[in-house]
Image (cartoon, helix red, strand yellow):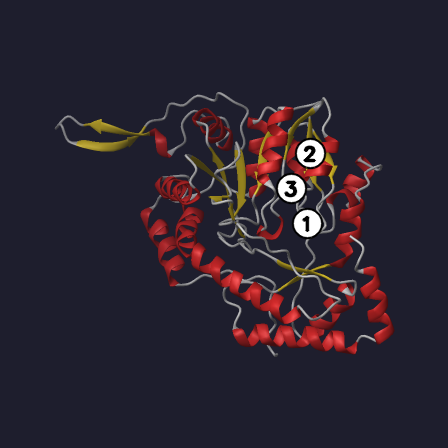
Amino acid sequence: MKKLIPVFYPDYGEEEVRAVSRVLRSGWIGLGPVTEEFEKRFAAYIGAPYAIAVNSATAALHLSVLAAGIGPGDEVIVPSLTFASTAHAVLYAGGTPVFADIDAETLDLSVDALRKKITKKTRAVIPVHYGGYPCDMEAISALADSAGLTVIEDASHACGTVYQGKKIGSISPFTCFSFHAVKNLATGDGGMITVRDKKLAEILRRLRWVGISKNTWERLEDIRGHNRASYKAYGWYYEVTDLGYKYHMNDITAALGIVQLSKLEKGNEKRRRLAARYTEAFKNIPEIRCPKESPGIVSAKHNYVIRTRERDRLHLYLREKNISTGVHYMPVHLQPYYRKRYPKTGLPVTEAVWPELLTLPLFPGLTTREQEYIIRCVRQFYRAVPADTRQAQNRASRTP
């Protein structure tokens, strides 16, 4: 394969180009009517009453933690197998992230581990839907309700995921989505918060716009001139009611989002077909453990992550074959900043699993020819592994 196969690639076409061009020609490129339209369409798609568009999932998590009332002295339980923003958001608000272990099969937050981490200081939990596979939200919600905790879902990987007949984003008080360049719905950068409560939506809208009571678009007023003609004019007056942040989305990003949303279901279905093809191809390779599948769950399939003891060697081998792979993730609690801050954190399942994780290319534009080449290279790699090494790895793979 002469051309490098990437891990991710956005599904862009002329529709996105035209949508962005319309915004640029309109003269209104900041937070405005296109962002509002994107919010309405996204809320309808998810089945949530309100959606608040922001400039990243990091911003979405930060604002959700703030709106949930988290502050100094409060603990928030998070998994460590996630992007750093999940834990960062808690620290931004002055709270303390408490790392809990994962389920060895789903790679999502373990309900038993969550239960053991709850203390009198615990105020919230942030379950992460790893790779698009949903957490056990029924059990997590029940446990959170009994302990008086707020659930803030990190759905950065789960745009379009369905859990027990409901889309992720319609279940908990807060759900945070990512529209980063590599996500299923990609706007370059961007994020969304879905909520059920009107007051929370109003708080989040103020916080994303520096705490100002009215954004620039909302300050356009209907004016009747001396000739009784009606026209729009800019109203300058606003009030700063909160210590907010410059976290809002703009209409250029939202224009991409509207087109991408229209493609999401078709793109996710393509991802599921590609993932099923990988799983079928690798089912007879004992050194590989494929992602879990369960009835009643429709995963967005953001990532296709295999487990193998030969992770690093396979990564280098595939790189030589012009196939990109990734690792999602080095656990947050093992990163230098968090190691210094929380040196006693021990998560046996997370620490056993993460050295085995390898993300294979998965995106709607991946061709059959490219995927067959990837599969062929993976098979060739394992045929080249010495028999005694394979036997040792097989015995080791029986551990979590």
Q: Give the labeled residue for mark 3.
A: 85
Mark 3 or 2: in front is 2
Determine whether the residue tagged by mark 2 lies in a helix, strand or loop: strand
Residue 387 in view (yes/no): yes
Residue 70 in view (yes/no): no
Residue type beneath disc 2: Ile
Residue type beneath disc 3: Ser
Determine whether the residue tagged by mark 3 lies in a helix, strand or loop: helix
Mark 1 neighbour density, 10 Å: few (under 14) some (14–19) many (20 or more)? many
The spot of residue 173 in percent (x, y) is 52, 31
- Would you place residue 358 above or below residue 372 in this image? above
Mark 1 or 2: in front is 1
Pick whichever of labels 1 and 3 is earlier in the sequence: 3
Left or right? Give the position of 289 relative to 362: right
Mark 1 or 3: in front is 1
The spot of residue 308 in percent (x, y) is 75, 63
Residue 363 sits in quarter:
bottom right
Instruction: Report how far apart the C-alphas of labels 1 and 2 lie in the structure.
Output: 16 Å
> What residue sits 68% from the left and 27% below the top?
94
Q: Nearer the viewer, residue 99 or 142?
A: 142
Residue type beneath disc 1: Leu
Pick whichever of labels 3 and 2 is earlier in the sequence: 2
Q: Give the labeled residue for mark 1.
A: 107
Mark 3 neighbour density, 10 Å: few (under 14) some (14–19) many (20 or more)? some
Left or right? Give the position of 383 relative to 296: right
Instruction: Report how far apart the C-alphas of labels 3 and 2 lie in the structure.
Output: 14 Å
> What residue sits 55% from the left and 38% below the top?
60
The spot of residue 158 in percent (x, y) is 54, 48
Q: Give the labeled residue for mark 2.
A: 77
- Would you place residue 308 above or below residue 80 in this image? below
